[in-house]
Amino acid sequence: MKIEYEKNRRPGTVIVAGTGNAALSAAIAAREKGAIVRVFDMADYANRGGNSRLTAAVLRIALNAPDKVEQLIQKSLSHNVEIEPYGPDRYFSEATASGKVDEQLIRWIVQNSHSTMLWLVQHGVELELSDHTYSTAARSGQQIYSGGLILQARGEGEGLINAELRILDDMGGMVQYESRVVDLIRSDQSGAVIGACIEDAHGKQWREYGKVILGSGGFESNREMVKEHLGELFAGLKQRCVRFNTGLMIQKSLAIGARPYGHWQGCHCSPIDVNAPSSADPTIKELTNRISFIAGIVVNREGKRFTDEGVNYPPKCYVGVALDTVHQTDQMGFQIFDQKGIPYLDNYYSAHGSTRREAMTLQELARKSGIDPSNLIKTVEAFNNACRKYSHLDYTFETLDHCQTDGLTPPKSNWARPVEEPPYVVYPYTAGITYTFGGLKVNQHAQVLDCHDQVIEGLYACGEAVGGVNHMPFYIAGQGLVKGAVTGMYAGHHAAMS
């Protein structure tokens, strides 16, 4: 059942920058409250949807009972499906584990995660049980969903964006592609933001008047800004992000006194195939991800381990592994598996074009991969000896098993099993930057605040443009789209009604 949007006799205008999930949630919310909604996106239609479209669209939602899941998928659960509760307290605890984030902001997002996603579902977005690796486990004929990654958008990121665009179109919202918001217009009297300057692909500029919502992402595709704030190492990374997230409107907001907020020296990045494209390709999406490292070991070009492959489940630690890789020779790592580990690799490893090498001996594997062979042999021998007592155990990823190496630095804290059954397989990978953590400070209406924590009237931010939610290297998968939906919905509602 869809919600009928409110009709206002004297609607205002709301200008939205971007067509990602956060921006479209804002646009739908503003139109629902009766505003005239005008969405502008720097991308053309083929590249619509921002970073949201590139994701698997797994959603971390506070779900403390099965009936909450049934509300969101709009059907009863099968008898063999078991949902392990993931309540708001656990969600909050995991999201604030770094101790360096805005706890009030995160609690607001967590507490509104279910109601906001239900709001989108009632408008026509479809959700389903997640098929994301490590979010499910089979046990005694039951399908177990645990760890918070229970649901995903049907059709992944592209399905989510297409659904939101369809909803907005049905509601009478306008989207104009190849046209970007390039500046803010302020009142001479009050200093409030009263509109935006728009520029099309041909350089033509014009003004639009109304409240402005920034859903145009972070600054991850702007190599100069990345170099300035994160350093030279990060400026050279492959980009998993769309090329349109230049941070321009974050800069324009700072120029009128907005408060920079969050971890400006931090970013989300992921281990990706070493031959992944240098910038995001909407046809590839997440197929280059390489996060099944828990079933093997990771070494650098020198043949030495440099990260804890089993510190936690991949959705909670893959960013940390990618960040460790940034500091290695050529910013490369090598994920090595034996025949005992291969069955546990996710489907992305077998995608067309994956970089993969195989050999019957470690020496031959090293030669094929450009790894120091003598060091690799020593590394694997030391690793195997440090976890020999677990040789008889099969891998099981239902829980952290605390099977850890003895006397190794770095350790492997869980799922330590010897790598000794040839043929051996290696997947060379590098780190790819997804989005930056630094942004603007907002209140719980998603209004942008200045350096004195006062509201900048008429200006809102949502999604990646909001800082304070993440601090490198801590990250838990699935919270980005939910953050975007919550901040977007509240921005749109308030902008339309104020």
Image (tube, rainbow, N blue to C red):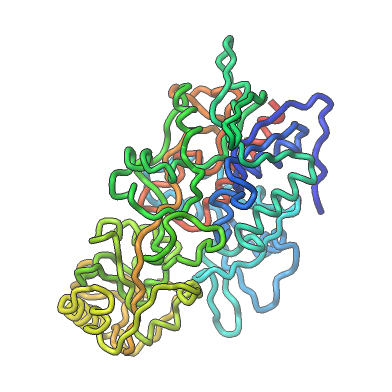
Please determine whether, in this image, residue 360 is positioned above or below residue 133.
below
User: Residue 322, image x and y in percent?
Assistant: 35, 59
Kindly identify the residue that appears in the image at 75 percent across and 66 percent down: 75
185 and 345: which is toward the camera: 185
Inspect this view and state whether residue 446 appears.
no
Taking the image as shown, residue 160 lies to the left or right of residue 372, namely: right
* Residue farthest along the top direction in this orientation: 189
Taking the image as shown, residue 58 lies to the left or right of residue 380, namely: right
Inspect this view and state whether residue 452 appears.
yes
67 and 159: which is toward the camera: 159
User: Residue 214, image x and y in percent?
Assistant: 57, 35
* Residue farthest along the front direction in this orientation: 202
Looking at the rendering, in which quadrant would you find the C terminus? top right
User: Residue 143, image x and y in percent?
Assistant: 60, 77
User: Residue 188, image x and y in percent?
Assistant: 57, 11
Kindly identify the residue that appears in the image at 71 percent across and 28 percent down: 13
Please determine whether, in this image, residue 40 is positioned above or below residue 278.
above
Looking at the rendering, in which quadrant would you find the N terminus? bottom right
Quadrant in which residue 418 is drawn: bottom left
